[in-house]
Amino acid sequence: MGERERDISISIQKVRHVYKGGNPAINGMSLDIHTGLFGMLGPNGAGKSTLMRIICSLLVPTEGRVIVGGHDVVKERRHVRRLLGYLPQDFNAWRLHRVEEVLGTLATLSGLENNSERRARVAEILELVGLLDVSHRKVKSLSGGMVRRLGVAQALIHDPKILIVDEPTVGLDPEERIHFRQLMAKLGKDRIIILSTHIVGDLGAGCHDLALIDRGRLEFRGSPEKLIAHAKGFVFEIHMEGNRAEPSDQYEVVSQEQKLGRTIIRVVSRMGEIPDGAVPVDNPTLEEAYLAFMASNSVKQAVKGGEVQS
């Protein structure tokens, strides 16, 4: 049985990574990831990109091990890279080449030397990501959303079992974000997709397992439903007279609307205390749950006085 047929998994074992200056970007993380769309949430600077680079064998961890499909990312880099497709946050290369030329070249470099097989593979991937109709265009003429989809295409050209995507929708408009979420949900049916982001909406309905990373530590692991359950008691609605809500350091405003001369705001309590006049929300959204968890976690860290730099 080949690697493609086996259930590929990723095992992160007590990983720690410290950059020059002594600041730990990853601080003792252990995590197992299996087939499907896996969300890795956390604020900018939490350590997500560092962890992605370690998984991709682009960075050697200071301590700990990462095993991808049974292969050590430090000792068996070639084996690991055959299993991986990677879309970095700053993908914007090949601007003067046509879309089909980009994928054709990368397919050749991945070992697909037969011309007819290579052309068929390029067409298959372009159709999958919705770029077949623009295959003749140069990369510089594509929209931001199309460039991100081309980034996914280049990561898929060698048919990897694992796809790692770092901050995929930065700079995209709402319609392009929707297309990207739909594509990730489709691709996650038969492979591991790790989607690293600080934007909860990037995950979409296809994500059934996620982790929250903050200050280089794994702070939560579970389903979106489990995270939402944790948020109950931290999300509220406040009805206020007039058309403007006064800011407060007690809570963070998630949404705000005006209705019949009143302002209705949904807020996340920073301190876990009910703001004056607030009504608890029984059905918080995933975004509200994320904000509530991170707000309560920040308070805990501040009380401990041991915040980890990332």
Image (cartoon, helix red, strand yellow):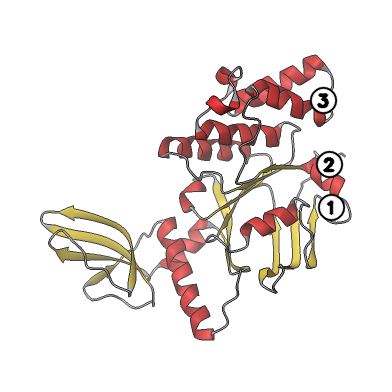
Q: Nearer the viewer, mark 2 or mark 3?
A: 3
Q: Tag 3 or tag 2, which sits nearer the N-term? A: 2
Query: CA gap, disc 2 to disc 3?
Result: 18 Å
User: Which quadrant would the C terminus be assigned to in this image?
Assistant: bottom right
Q: Position of residue 257 (x, y in %)?
A: 22, 54
Q: Quadrant of the N terminus?
A: top right
Q: Residues within 10 Å of mark 2 (few under 14, many from 20)?
A: few
Residue 112, which numbered label?
3
The structure residue drawn at horizontal position 71% and vertical position 54%, both measured from the top left corner, is: 53
User: Label 2 to label 1, Cα distance in Å?
Assistant: 9 Å
Q: Residue 127 placed where, x, y %?
A: 61, 23
Q: Residue at x 68, y 54 (%)?
A: 52
Task: From the image, tell me which residue sits under label 2.
Answer: 3
Q: Element under label 3?
A: loop
Select label 3 or label 1 by which is in front. 3
The residue that disc 1 covers is 70
Amino acid tagged 3 = Leu
Q: Residues within 10 Å of mark 3 (few under 14, many from 20)?
A: some
Count of marks overlaid on the render: 3
Q: Earlier in the sequence, mark 2 or mark 1?
A: 2
Amino acid type of the residue that numbered disc 1 sits on in the rendered structure: Gly
Rendered view: 241 above or below 124: below
Q: Which mark is residue 131?
A: none
Verify CB contact (< 8 Å) between mark 2 and mark 1: yes
Which sits in the foreground, 35 or 26?
A: 26
The vertical placement of 47 against 91, above or below, is below
Q: Where does residue 157 sit, x and y in percent of width and height?
A: 72, 31
Residue 45 appears in which quarter of the rendering?
bottom right
Relative to 105, residue 91 above or below = below
